[in-house]
């Protein structure tokens, strides 16, 4: 089991005077909840209505400079987990933090996400954030906030986000950066 105490990757800069922290985070969740869109909004500041489902993993980088020390985030965008694409714990290796994404317009994404959460936590115990995404869309008529609240203690923080408008996207990634550098 990989724990919170796993040591960070440190790389020396060219002049060897500053140590740049490099940390891996994984973005996980059911298919179509907006994992790729959240990362695209954060890294490139763009959003597209087009849906191109992710296959495998794509890695993006972004330097965070607002915490107690700069950290290079390596953001692993994992393919959505559903009946066609099963949970693959190999992708989690070396991750220092996790962002779990659900979709506010599809209430069943919450229970699907909590299954993914349980599978993940068998392998890795690191700071975790819940993102309830697509806040710009009408909330699912089946939405039951008491069920969502009952899962709250499983996460270090919860953000209600929109990859479309950018709502809380930067704050969420900044927060995971802080959680993994300060823990
Ligand atoms: N309105 C709205 N649409 C969103 C938001 N986030 C994502 N979408 C749309 O939802 C669809 C799926 O978005 P993706 O970012 O590809 O979702 P994903 O979780 O990466 O999907 P997989 O890779 O298939 O698991 C796309 O059509 C996006 O435009 C959001 O916050 N608001
Ligand atoms: Mg994707």
Image: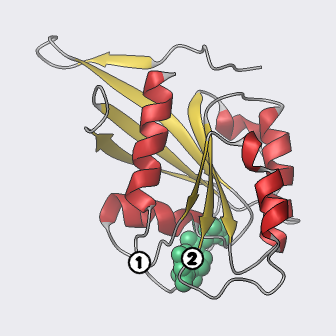
Mark closer to the chain start, 1 or 2: 2
Determine whether the beta carbon of the residue marked 2 sits less than 8 angstroms from the nearest atom of ligand 1.
yes
Quadrant showing the N terminus: top right
Locate residue 130, reporting x and y percent. 64, 52
Indicate the position of residue 18 as horizontal and vertical percent values.
Answer: 19, 16
**Left of 15 or right of it: where is 78?**
right
Q: Is 136 placed above or below 5 here? A: below
Report crowding for label 2: few under 14, some 14 to 19, many 20 or more residues within 10 A (C-alpha). some
Q: Is residue 126 visible?
A: yes
Q: Position of residue 10 (x, y in %)?
A: 37, 17
Tell me the quarter of the picture where residue 131 sits. Answer: bottom right
In the image, residue 64 sits, relative to residue 180, either above or below, namely below
Residue at position x 29%, y 41% in the image: 63
Rounded to the nearest angstrom, the CA distance separating label 1 from label 2 is 9 Å
Q: Which residue is mark 2?
A: 135
The answer to whether the residues at label 1 and label 2 have Cβ atoms under 8 Å apart is yes
| Residue for badge 1 | 165
Residue 125 badge:
none
- The answer to whether the residue bearing label 1 lies less than 8 angstroms from the nearest atom of ligand 1 is yes
Which residue is at a point 72% across and 68% down the rendered structure image?
Answer: 31
């Amino acid at each position: 089991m990989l724990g919170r105490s796993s040591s960070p990757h440190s790389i020396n800069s060219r002049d060897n005077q500053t140590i740049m922290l490099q940390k891996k985070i994984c973005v996980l969740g059911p298919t179509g909840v907006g994992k790729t869109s959240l990362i695209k909004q954060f890294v490139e500041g763009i959003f597209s209505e087009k849906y191109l489902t992710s296959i495998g993993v794509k890695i993006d980088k972004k330097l965070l400079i607002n915490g107690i020390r700069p950290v290079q985030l390596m953001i692993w965008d994992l393919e959505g987990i559903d009946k066609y694409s099963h949970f693959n714990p190999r992708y989690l290796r070396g991750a220092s933090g996790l962002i779990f994404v659900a979709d506010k317009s599809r209430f069943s994404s919450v229970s699907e996400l909590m299954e993914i959460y349980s599978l993940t936590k068998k392998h890795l115990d690191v700071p975790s954030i819940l993102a309830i995404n697509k806040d710009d869309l009408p909330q699912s008529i089946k939405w039951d906030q008491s069920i969502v609240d009952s899962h709250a203690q499983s996460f270090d923080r919860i953000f209600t986000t929109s990859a479309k408008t950018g709502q809380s996207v930067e704050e969420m990634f900044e927060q995971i950066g802080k959680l993994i550098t300060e823990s």
